[in-house]
Amino acid sequence: MLFTISRGNVPEYQEGQEPVVHLVSSVEDVRAFQPPLQWLFTDGHAVIDLSNYYDDVADLNKIDWEIMGRRYWADTLEDGDRERRRQAEFLVYQFFSWRLISKIGVMNQEMNERVHAILAAIEHKPAVAVERGWYY
């Protein structure tokens, strides 16, 4: 979706990538949260029937970690399933505590300053970092 946004191909949203922030957490933190959260993950885009659902961290190896590390992951003639696999999801049911956010990735220094200004008024302050490589 971020690539599509970067190309201006989302008619309902035309503000570009800059306002998009990445909220970072971890499987370990979600699992340790009290009261316990209901969660699962997929090995591909959740709405595609080919994708499988898992609720055991022992199955994290079912995710295509090699494709997760790639910057470009379009389907190819040799592998027509790359896009689906790259869109694997970790989903939490109904509630996700702000305290589980450990980091906020932003596109540039201007957004870094804007996020810091917003966080100034609240108790839990995740780390904020410019992560230009997370954007197109």
Image: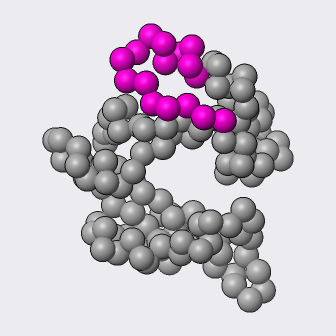
Residue 33: quadrant of the picture:
top left
Give the side of residue 80 with respect to residue 104, left or right: right
Residue at image x 57%, y 14%?
A: 117
Give the side of residue 26 with respect to residue 16, left or right: left
Position of residue 77 relative to residue 36, above or below, is below
Q: What is the residue that sits farthest to the left in this orientation?
A: 35
The part of the chain drawn in magenta is 115-130
Position of residue 106 relative to residue 29, above or below, is above
Q: Nearer the viewer, residue 111 or 42?
A: 111
Q: What is the residue that sits farthest to the bottom in this orientation?
A: 78
Q: Is residue 117 magenta?
A: yes
Q: Position of residue 50 (x, y in %)?
A: 50, 78
Q: What is the residue that sits farthest to the right in this orientation?
A: 7
Q: Position of residue 39 (x, y in %)?
A: 30, 55
Residue at image x 63%, y 18%?
A: 114
Residue at image x 77%, y 49%?
A: 136
